[in-house]
Amino acid sequence: MAGLILLPSALPAGEATPASALPVRGIHFSAPGKRDLPATLEFIRTALATNGVNTLIIEFNYRYDFQSRPEFADPSALDRADAQQLLAACRASGIELIPMINCLGHQSWAARNDRLLQLHPEFDETPGKYPENQDIYCRSYCPRHPEVHGVLFDLMDELVRDCEAKAFHVGMDEVFLLADPDCPRCAGQAPAELFAEEVGRLRDHLAGRGCRLWVWGDRFLDGRATGLGRWEASENDTQAAIDRVPKDIVICDWHYDAAPETAAHFARKGFDVVSCPWRKPAVALEQLALMRALRQDDDPEVARRARGMVQTTWCGLEAFRRAYADLAGGAPIQQNSAYESANCFRELFRAMPPRTAD
């Protein structure tokens, strides 16, 4: 790992505000389609701004018209001019735009590999195994393949440039395929070591671009010791990575069915942390209460690391926008991610009004 590079906070200011006024009041979406961009820009300027959102994570992955790597060009996806429009709408609304590419895991969905492994099957951690992705959740790329980071870094750098980003989310949740016994580079290696090595490599590259790394927190938690299980925490021995990664990364601590006190765990380990609900308002409000209590911790350094909330959606920005508009118009909540996450967002942000009202 390269020497430590000190970074700007890449987090909205807010240390002078009371504990109830959270520095990070965020939401995460998949990137909108090109035809949905005008509606997205209006949604940012109106609904997100009105609710006091100040952090917008856009998960591009490989759905972008990349020019740095011609094989990833996609004229049907957003391009640099579109990213600049997103950035302008965010800046006009006081919102920090954070681009995202899923790294390490989530390189497939169902039977279909995502574009990284479609275009570069040599990067697969388990090549030739699990035909049509049967019996696995999602594929991973091999973190020790000698050429994978050359490709990834070009794509990341393009999004950093186009979004003028000061922070970048690298995903890395739910990584189950790691240290595969048939991988010639990873076989026999400790999963925690491989995971920490990849976090550090990505962090160092982004730091060299003046960008702070954000990452999901589940692989840093012990699923057995905490009882959280293999999804919201690790049962494949990556949890020890928490003591091997730089402390200047931001942990996105997601839990959807209950509100364990894991944000406090991360803050006491020395990390800035945000809590991330999905579609259950009661869980979101409990997480909010825990976050506000943590911001009043007796240890001022621990209190400072409790940064706020990021609503996840898992439905696409346009579906969320439509559901949000329907709910605002009095429509009943439908049992799907768009309506449930939009309802959770409304309840959560109603409980933490903009700072001027806190």
Image (tube, rainbow, N blue to C red):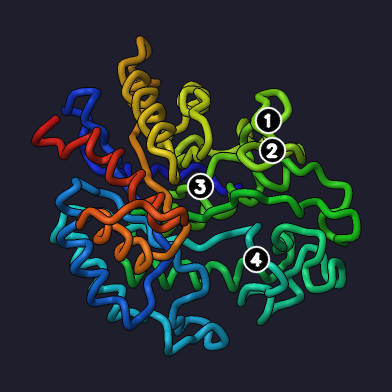
Residue 222: assigned label: 1
In the rendered image, residue 74, in percent from the top left (x then y), is placed at 47, 86
Residue that appears at 66% across and 69% down: 148
* Residue 177 in which image quadrant: bottom right
Disc 3 residue type (three-letter): Val
Work out whether residue 41 or residue 14 is closer to the camera in this orientation and state it: 41
Foreground mark, 3 or 4?
4
Could you classify mark 4 by the number of other residues whose Cα lies within 10 Å: few (under 14), some (14-19), or many (20 or more)?
many
Quadrant where the C terminus sits is top left
Residue 306: x percent and y percent?
A: 37, 28
Real-space Cα separation, disc 1 to disc 3, in angstroms: 17 Å
> Is residue 190 placed above or below 316 in the rendered structure?
above
The residue depicted at 39 percent of the width and 62 percent of the height is 58
In the image, is 298 to the left or to the right of 147?
Answer: left
Which residue does the numbered mark 4 point to in the structure image? 107
Establish if 10 lies above or below 97.
above
Residue 215 has which mark? 3
Q: Amino acid at mark 2?
A: Ser
Q: Position of residue 83 (x, y in %)?
A: 31, 73
